[in-house]
Image (tube, helix red, strand yellow):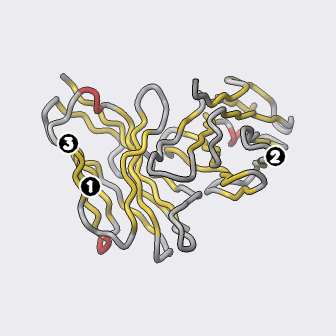
Amino acid sequence: EAQVTQNPRYLITVTGKKLTVTCSQNMNHEYMSWYRQDPGLGLRQIYYSMNVEVTDKGDVPEGYKVSRKEKRNFPLILESPSPNQTSLYFCATRPLAGIGETQYFGPGTRLLVL
Amino acid sequence: AQKVTQAQTEISVVEKEDVTLDCVYETRDTTYYLFWYKQPPSGELVFLIRRNSFDEQNEISGRYSWNFQKSTSSFNFTITASQVVDSAVYFCALSPRKGGGTSYGKLTFGQGTILTVHP
């Protein structure tokens, strides 16, 4: 079964405590991306990766880091979380080629930073 | 910096009504892609259409149609004879087109329009 998994699904943390949200896909997709979704602001892209070892900034990369050492994994790292990073985070994947451009989303990670 | 604006936060219609979702964009890139996605309650982002900046032909796909007007930087989406299954959040998005290929990476989304179709 095609899957995008994210962990954890829910997280409450405190300001400054480093955390990692993992994303893993089993579809062999080249492209992976992280988004945050906030009421009234819609979806905003944080970082994306076109393939292993190839990452680039989206519209709101400040305060986040990513890495793509393997094709299937694309973790999102918050080195020093702050309350304005409280949000719903989605990881997404899609193949680079072809016209089937649906992005497959993970279930989301709801993060609260106190 | 690029920007996408979907001024309609929520739209409510009755089944079989036509509905148009507005999208206005800003970009300094000379070549770019425009998209529409549908996000049903299940959460995935379903691709609906991609349009090249140099192709201003309107497109129709079943009950869906798109009107791209470069002069007004708009890319509007119309659903004809709406159905309850059309209820979802709809996102317009923009991506710069780099190089000669068709691939793209960075996506800027609008705020989304929540469409509710009542029976």
In space, the residues marked 3 and 1 are separated at their CA atoms by 10 Å
Which residue is found at the position 50% from the left and 75% from the top?
B28
Residue bearing the label numbered 2: A69
Which residue is found at the position 47% from the left and 47% from the top?
A101
Q: Are marks 1 and 2 on the same chain?
A: no
Q: In the rendered image, is residue B116 in sight?
A: yes
In space, the residues marked 2 and 3 are separated at their CA atoms by 43 Å
B36 relative position to A15: left or right: left
Query: Which amino acid type is marked by label 3?
Result: Arg
Query: Which amino acid type is marked by label 1?
Result: Trp
Estimate the x, y position of residue A85 in percent, counting from the top left.
Answer: 69, 41
Residue bearing the label numbered 3: B63
Estimate the x, y position of residue B69 in percent, counting from the top left.
Answer: 28, 68
Residue count near mark 3 (Cα–Cα under 10 Å), binned few <14, some 14–19, many ≥20: few
Query: Which amino acid type is marked by label 2?
Result: Lys
| Chain letter, disc 1 residue | B
Q: Nearer the viewer, mark 1 or mark 2?
A: 2
A19 relative position to B28: left or right: right
Considering only vertical position in the picture, is B22 above or below A78? below
Residue bearing the label numbered 1: B66
